Amino acid sequence: MGISGKWKVYDAAKLAIANGEIDLDNHSFKIALFLSTSNCNTLSGATSLSNLTNQVATGFGYTQSAKAVTIATSQSGGVVTVDETTNPSWTAAGGSIVARFAVIYDDTHASKQALCVCLLDTTPANATATDGNSFTITIGASGLFTISGATAD
């Protein structure tokens, strides 16, 4: 796998960040993989991990909802960048890991609030790691997403 595509922030996550329900600096986050038949790419309906359908099944080196990721924030010129610093990876064992989407969610939040989603292959096609190979999601140099707005006069 290579560099992931653009990450899109869920509508409910935007509100949860604004309301202080998602703490990007102090909460724990995890990443989960989803099949092409999932509803996880619909930004308006996802509020929690349990709302998302068709997560990749545990097996072949992937364990559902078990991969921790590290979220980091920085600010420059009025723009806050939210990044993931670990480039999550799984090693396929005994078969292939196949996924279309990745979702990062707030594991500290009571409902496991879905934060953002990424289409892993813009063809679009499934991303696949065959037996013995790594399924790695490399986050782009510009981070997951940015938060910006008007500056004060």
Image (cartoon, rainbow, N blue to C red):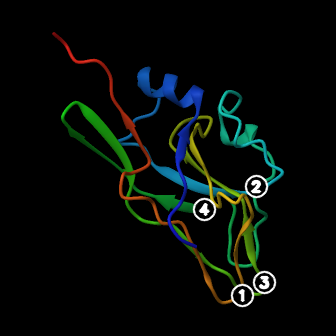
* Residue located at (72% from left, 87% from top): 131
Q: Which mark is residue 66?
A: 4
Residue 29 in view here: yes
Q: Which element carries disc 4, helix, strand or loop?
A: loop
Is label 2 in contact with label 3 (beta carbons under 8 Å)? no
Q: Amino acid at mark 1?
A: Asp
Q: Amino acid at mark 3?
A: Gly
Q: Say whether disc 2 or disc 3 marks the residue closer to the N-terminus.
A: 2
Mark-to-mark CA distance, 4 and 3: 19 Å
Q: Say whether disc 3 or disc 1 marks the residue closer to the N-terminus.
A: 3
Which residue in the structure is indicated by mark 3? Answer: 95
Q: Amino acid at mark 4?
A: Ala
Between label 4 and label 3, give the one nearer the viewer: 3
Q: Which mark is residue 27?
A: none
Q: Which element carries disc 1, helix, strand or loop?
A: loop
Is residue 45 left or right of 91 when viewed as pictured? right
Which residue in the structure is indicated by mark 2? Answer: 55
Q: Is residue 12 above or below residue 112?
A: above
Q: Say whether disc 1 or disc 4 marks the residue closer to the N-terminus.
A: 4
Which residue in the structure is indicated by mark 1? Answer: 131
